[in-house]
Amino acid sequence: MGKDILKKILKQQNHPSLALKVDLENLKIEEYIVVDVRTPSLYITTPHIQNSYNIHNLSMLQDFCQQHQNQKILLVCNGGLESAKYGTLLVENGLKNIFYLDEYLQIIEEKIPLEYPKEAK
């Protein structure tokens, strides 16, 4: 399967959420505080958005969002499913300005610089 066909299939995904979905084509990353909701082990061993926070624990994420309630929070993960789930839980708990990116990291990388883990020596 070619890379372009794979990208087309991946872009057709839809993980519904009560959080607001952000369109990658129109994303201005500097307008958001980016929170990567993957597990810490995944975050440190795989590429992630530069300057993103890694918060996987829902209680800690909720506290973080409350502390930054006047700013836009963008939730990201490997493919959109986890960020959509966390987004819904945060909105159900009364938080506002919660957004999520429903994209795979391989597609995000074409628009947003990713930070790669340093190789173990």
Image (cartoon, helix red, strand yellow):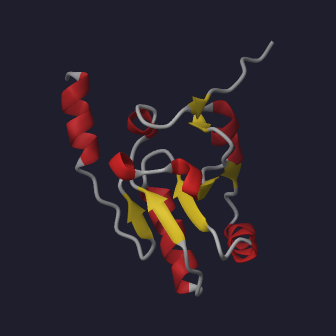
Is 91 located above or below residue 11 in the figure? below
Q: Is residue 53 left or right of residue 107?
A: right
Is 82 located above or below residue 41 in the figure? below
- Residue for point 73% across, 68% down: 64
Residue 108, image x, y percentages = 43, 39
Place residue 58 in its image quadrant.
bottom right
For the N terminus, the image quarter is: top left
Q: Nearer the viewer, residue 32 or 11?
A: 32
Q: How many marks?
A: 0
For the C terminus, the image quarter is: top right
- Residue for point 50% across, 60% down: 83
- Residue for point 48% across, 50% down: 28
Residue 76, image x, y percentages = 52, 53
Residue 100, image x, y percentages = 47, 61
Q: Is residue 63 left or right of residue 12?
A: right
Is 101 located above or below residue 64 in the figure? above
Q: Is residue 118 left or right of residue 15?
A: right
Which residue in the rendered view is the most extreme toward the top?
121
Place residue 49 in its image quadrant.
top right
Residue 3, image x, y percentages = 26, 24
- Residue for point 50% across, 58% down: 82
Is 54 located above or below residue 99 in the figure? above
